[in-house]
Amino acid sequence: MARKQEADVVVVGAGPVGLLAALALKTAGVDVAVYDANRRTGVHSYATVLHVATQNLLDRAGLLAACSAHGRPVDKLVLYEGAQRKADIDIALAAGESTHLLVVPQSRLESILEDALASRGVRVHWEHRIQSLEAAAEGVDLVVARLDSVSTGYPIARSERVVASMFDLTAKYVIGADGYDSFVRRRLGIDNPATGNAEMFSVYQLEPEGPIPEEGRFVFAKDGVTAYWPLPDGRCRFSFPIADHTQHRPDEAGLLSHLAERAPWFPSTVKGIEWTAHALFERRLANWFGSGRVWLAGDAAHLTGPVGAQSMNVGLREGSDLAACLAAILRQGAGADTLEAYAGERKAEWRRLLGVDASLRGDAGAWTQAYLGRLLSCLPASGDALDALAGQIGLQLKAS
Ligand SMILES: Cc1cc2nc3c(=O)[nH]c(=O)nc-3n(C[C@H](O)[C@H](O)[C@H](O)COP(=O)(O)OP(=O)(O)OC[C@H]3O[C@@H](n4cnc5c(N)ncnc54)[C@H](O)[C@@H]3O)c2cc1C
């Protein structure tokens, strides 16, 4: 075992949330180290939707212009029930400095964050898996496995990952931003119970032949919500609800049959499918967001459906808030109760977003009544901006 390394804060996971948290810490003058078990390749650069609040956050970090250069602004959402257009939502009416949603490839957002971090002298330790974590009153001891790929197999070549070396690491604080199957959360013994049903989607990113709608479109049906987003460079993405993975047909015939059933308004023909996948989205919320010197942010602490893009957007806000709390403790002597306050606030927001403590009410027409339980997670906003979007279709968020 190599000698012990030290950092004030260790961030476990270099997804968008961990990268933003590390950047905010470094910008605040805190010594930070970032470890990720994998190497993000960006092969499946699925696009993600940046909420207005997230764009404001990135603007304050000096990164919005770079994201905008690779993004597509979307200023309107159109809601359908089956083939019938039911309501429009104008994003500009939500409070904020930016007046549209921004659709960017998630891999592009991650590389912008990684480059910003590198320009401040912090290099992500890719292929370094945290595999032990012991928290004590005065700090956290971790064991890191450095992974390597070795070629195996003959005559068919394949590669396997092996542990090349191990070393010890100590930190004053740890941020667990290690995604849906969080090792850090499990190590803390924090349960992550389901708050609703999981949903499976068949996702197609495609190159159309002909014009495409400029706005985001959501199609409500009894068995789930279809989401359409126009992407940068004239492409677009559909996520269709499916009952199980056997219904995912990864070919043009599968796409055309979904389009005929769920999106007959789509005006274009299909030139090619860039990629397609089926993905299961669970709804879960951690019982708490950390303890002592180890705290969680992003998918490590919560999961929801993909339509309103709330997981990543609210996760980015958490990464930024948690970094601010730790910087205040480490640099300005703030009390540890700051972290309990962070956890309380995050937990309350997610109980609201997941409909545990709140639900949508209103009389915007019969069609909304049938989908009240689903609508909340489909609106691409949180906090006051979520109320503003819901208000446009005559709904209010009420405590249940
Ligand atoms: C097909 C698909 C489409 C999606 N579409 C959208 C969308 O449109 N909008 C949206 O908001 N969200 C979408 N999501 C969800 C979105 O990708 C996640 O919400 C987001 O990536 C969460 O970011 P994160 O940083 O919390 O975690 P992650 O991005 O999951 O990053 C966690 C990182 O931690 C690392 N890690 C795990 N364990 C360890 C360990 N022991 N040691 C070191 N590193 C570790 C992992 O390698 C990983 O890189 C989609 C997801 C999928 C699969």
Image: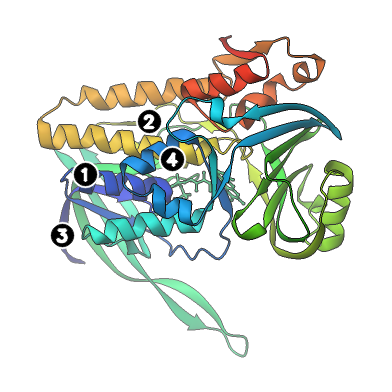
Instruction: Tell me the kind of residue under disc 3.
Output: Lys
Residue assigned mark 4: 55
Residue assigned mark 2: 289
Whichever of callouts 2 and 4 sits on the residue coming sooner in the sequence is 4
- Most extreme residue toward the bottom is 155
Disc 1 to disc 2, how far (Cα)?
Answer: 17 Å
Instruction: Tell me the kind of residue under disc 4.
Output: Gln
Element under disc 1: strand
Element under disc 3: strand
Q: Is residue 341 above or below residue 248?
A: above
Q: Is residue 345 left or right of residue 169?
A: right
Q: Is residue 23 left or right of residue 79?
A: left
| Residue 365 position in % (x across, y down) | 78, 14
Residue 179 shows in this picture: yes
Specify few, some or many for label 3: CA neighbours under 10 Å numbering under 14, 14-19, or 20 or more.
few
Whichever of callouts 1 and 2 sits on the residue coming sooner in the sequence is 1
| Residue 72 position in % (x across, y down) | 56, 50
Q: Is residue 345 left or right of residue 386?
A: left
Specify few, some or many for label 1: CA neighbours under 10 Å numbering under 14, 14-19, or 20 or more.
many
- Which residue shows up at 35% across the image and 46% down it? 20
Instruction: Tell me the kind of residue under disc 2.
Output: Phe
Mark 3: C-beta under 8 Å from nearest atom of ligand 1: no
Q: Are marks 4 and 3 in contact (CB under 8 Å)?
A: no
Q: Are marks 3 and 1 in contact (CB under 8 Å)?
A: no
Q: Are marks 2 and 4 in contact (CB under 8 Å)?
A: no
Residue assigned mark 3: 4
Q: How does the figure colour the protein chain or chains?
A: rainbow
Disc 3 to disc 1, how far (Cα)?
Answer: 12 Å
Q: Nearer the viewer, residue 188 or 391?
A: 391
Disc 1 to disc 4, how far (Cα)?
Answer: 33 Å
Residue 34 got which mark? none
Mark 1: C-beta under 8 Å from nearest atom of ligand 1: no
